[in-house]
Amino acid sequence: MAPESYLVVGGSGFLGRHIVKQLLARGDNVSVFDIVQRYHDTPFYSGDISEKDQVLSVLKRCGTTCIIHTASPQHGLKDPSLYFKINVDGTKSVIAAAQEAGVRKLIYTSSAGAVFAGTDIVDADERVPYPEKPFDAYNESKANGEAAVLAANRQGGLLTVALRPAGIYGPGDRQMMQGMYDVFRKGQTHFQIGDNNNLFDITYVENVAYAHLLAADKLDTPPPSKPLSQWPDKDEYSLENLPPLTQEERNILGPALPHIALTTKPRRIPTSAARPLGPCLNVTPELEKIEQRFRDPNSVEKDRPTVRTRFDQMSEYTVARAKIFNPEATPLSVDGQAFFISNGEPIYFWDLARVIWRHLDGIFPGQRKERSPFVMPKSVGMLVAGLLETIGWVTGKEATLTKFRVTFTCVNRWHNIEKARRVLGYEPPVSAQDGIKRMVEWFAEEVVAGNVSEKAGH
Amino acid sequence: MGVGTWLLLLVTHPNEFRTLVQFWLHHESKRDITDESEHATSGWDRESMRKCWGFLDATSRSFSAVIKELDGDLARAIALFYLVLRGLDTIEDDMTIPNDKKQKLLRSFHELTLTEGWTFTENGPNEKDRQLLVEYDCVVTELNLLDPGYKKVIIDICHKMENGMADFAHKAAVSKGPVYVETAEEYDLYCHYVAGLVGEGLSGIFSASGKEAPWLASQLELSNSMGLLLQKTNIIRDFREDTDDSRFFWPREIWGAFGFNDMAEMRLGPGIDVKEGVKERALWVQSAMILDAMRHLVDALDYLRVLKNQTVFNFCAIPATMAIATLELCFMNPAMFERNIKIRKAEAADLIMKSTNPREVAYILRDFCRKIHARSSPKDPSFMALSLTCGQIEQWCEHQYPSFIQLNASQSGHASTSMNPADQRSQIVLADTEKEKAYKRETRYRQLGLNPNAPGPAAENAGLPWEMFLMIGAMIGAVALISVGVIFAVLWWFPEGQ
């Protein structure tokens, strides 16, 4: 097979750049399409993605076989129309151009926010529908763009997949760090709204980039079963008599996956079949084998039980039912599917900030006075925010605490990434903790270099 | 507890008083092993077994109560398993036995324990369980009467444990000065020998009884995790008692990283010259040790989740909830470095009463994790790992027992479920219900020979009226049929002119 030719749309951006770097690192043929050029290690094409002809001509010139579409305006713009222009119209024109140019693969960077409605997202899997009332324009436009990409799967020879990273962070990200740094400098780090029992997903940018490469590699994997509509005995199956899963599907749902605990650096549990020898006196060949097994990272204990509820997306019951409801669907395929991507290590909301501030303490010692936390229940927070908003409305000044922000800080937002792990084979390579360390260290260098605005200082 | 203590409790901790009264009233032993109907499985009719039950009570009263509640002959098998390990432990513990003699005894214990008439009388006078070995022949007799499936597991584990214990005992005997566990790996290994293997053995016995799945016996990692969780909890809690007796189980890899040269340097309290900063560093060590124990919680939940037998479940779940309660008690608690601390009796009673199903146990664990998390300081080097470990328990709970489905028990005793609309997962269930309805409607149409998509432009709205018409038609038909039937019956039974 001819080697893939990649075009990274938005390749100058925060995530796009990491994808380009990883593709280059493995020696792939990469081009970048973006508005501005920031790096000079790949062929670069400047253009507007909402102009289909511009995209088409680049695809033809590059001979692109795989598009990774990461372009999206930053969250938090005043004018929502730009979101729809880029995320919806732009994405549709990329799709149309890809189909016309005969591109085989399209990987779209969606967002976990596509299903966020302002209410709790707890262990949510990909079955959660798009909200009827979207949270904001950004999330709405991401959902619309994603829907267009998934609808284009297997249309005009194109295979598509959408990835939904949750809370991307890492070196190069100014959004999260700037906010944290401002609060740190203002000495307001002791405030806490809510009980801090709500978990929040974050995803280190290199992990997200890695997931994109995986999705690109696996996108043309044949589905693990034919759609039910093509089975000769399809009429025998019903909700009462669910269709059996194929062996390939069983392999995917297969043995239990280890719990993700990159940050805690789990040590292997010693057992009588695999353990170190310790202060052993007479070592026999038999015992040496036991120790070898313990040291060998590939010798895992097989057949750990997988217990699933019927509600579980990855239960045989749910997969088989999905086929009955939609005989055209192949629920465990890569193409035509959306996947949540995260570190798999959700963190309590305020802990993330505290870890970042603690790192900043180490870099900028003595900047912050030690104060015991001031905890405000959510209801009080809402009340205060309402008051501040009213004052802000009267005085014409922006309120420092809004109801939107109170909701945002008290809500659960974490996702189930088992589908990405099982279908794409995604295992986050970098731990949440290492990722934060790298981000803060990068940001501190930026501060020292004078690249960070310090508007909020005393 | 004496009457005075009860009264004092009533005044100072009325809630605890209530819990203990309820425990005493409602949690009476479910099984009487002395009853004649139980003799076949409990062996109470044999003198040797009666003696064994007596030794079990003598060695550990709380533990023996839990063992006796196990179903059928499981209670007897596990009682004997426990006594064998006690016997082994009593030899290992005894510092009056010279090392070469101890090595021989330990490494042949799996044979001695099956040798009819074998007893051991050379324990030092201070060994609290020395009498067990003096009359050990009753254990031997009973072991030889045990079902071969159980016996095989017990001897196999005994063999593995005796060698591990002998290895560590030898290391202690030949080294000068205090003996430390050096690495975290060695710490795990030590806990594997003294507790992980017990877990393996229990799983083996559960499987052999047929009351649990046959594959439970081969779940070595899960079984070890259970054992390690409990053992590490005890090792953490017993810090003061152990260090006072020069027993150092905490690995140097963990406390050495915080600038201590000796485990005893972490001791606090009256009579000890505590230097500046020692308390804080000791607490970080404590936190790192507790985090290390908490790593096993998810595996423990995985293990509990697959158990089927209620008595086995209780037997395993109660120590696990006690362990998390103990870890929570110790966390960021300097008193642990001063003296022995223990969870309160009422809390223990409360946990025993609640540890009845995996859902409840999972949420008990989660709640204790939240309490630990709430006390965790960002200055603690383990802060983030601890936070994410608590997050793992939250994830486990929500995945296995999603909280958006709420069980409501009504006054009339009927249980119903409802969904929390603020949780997006409820949308999945609603969508699924819709799909099921649509599917059933379509199937019904097809069975009636109608095309569900046919009725033209009104098809989408036609679904409901059509269904209604059919229902009404069917009901009218049914009523007509019944009426005809009744008329016919009346005419049949009461013919005209009677």
Image: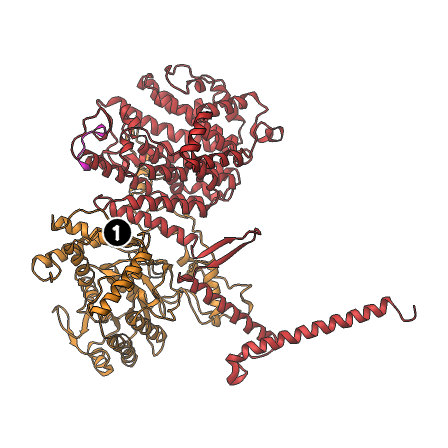
Chain colours: A orange, B red
In the depicted structure, whether residue B122 falls above or below residue B455: above
Identify the amino acid type marked 1: Asp
Indicate the quadrant where residue A278 lies: top left
Locate residue B486, reporting x and y percent: 78, 69
- The N terminus of chain A is located in which quarter? bottom left
Locate residue B305, reporting x and y percent: 45, 46
Locate residue B114, reporting x and y percent: 47, 24
Most extreme residue toward the left, as rendered?
A: A449
Callout 1: SS: helix
Residue nearer the viewer, B271 or B34:
B271
Query: Residue at point 48% right, 39% down?
Result: B353
Indicate the quadrant where residue A132 lies: bottom left
Residue nearer the viewer, B227 or B163:
B227
In the image, taking residue A307 as reference, residue A444 lies left or right, namely left
Q: Is residue B442 magenta?
A: no
In the image, taking residue B347 as reference, residue B184 lies left or right, namely left
Q: Is residue B260 magenta?
A: yes
Residue nearer the viewer, B24 or B303:
B24
Q: Residues within 10 Å of mark 1 (few under 14, many from 20)?
A: many
Locate residue B278, reporting x and y percent: 19, 33
Query: Residue at point 35% right, 42% down?
Result: B296
Query: Residue at point 53% right, 31% down?
Result: B147
Residue A296 visible (yes or no): no
Question: Label 1 lies in what chain?
Answer: A
In the depicted structure, whether residue A361 falls above or below residue A424: above
Residue A379 visible (yes or no): yes
In the depicted structure, whether residue B351 falls above or below residue B480: above
In the image, taking residue B370 as reference, residue A243 lies left or right, namely right
In the depicted structure, whether residue A127 falls above or below residue A348: below
- The C terminus of chain A is located in which quarter? bottom left
Highlighted range, magenta: B257-264
Report the residue marked by disc 1.
Answer: A351
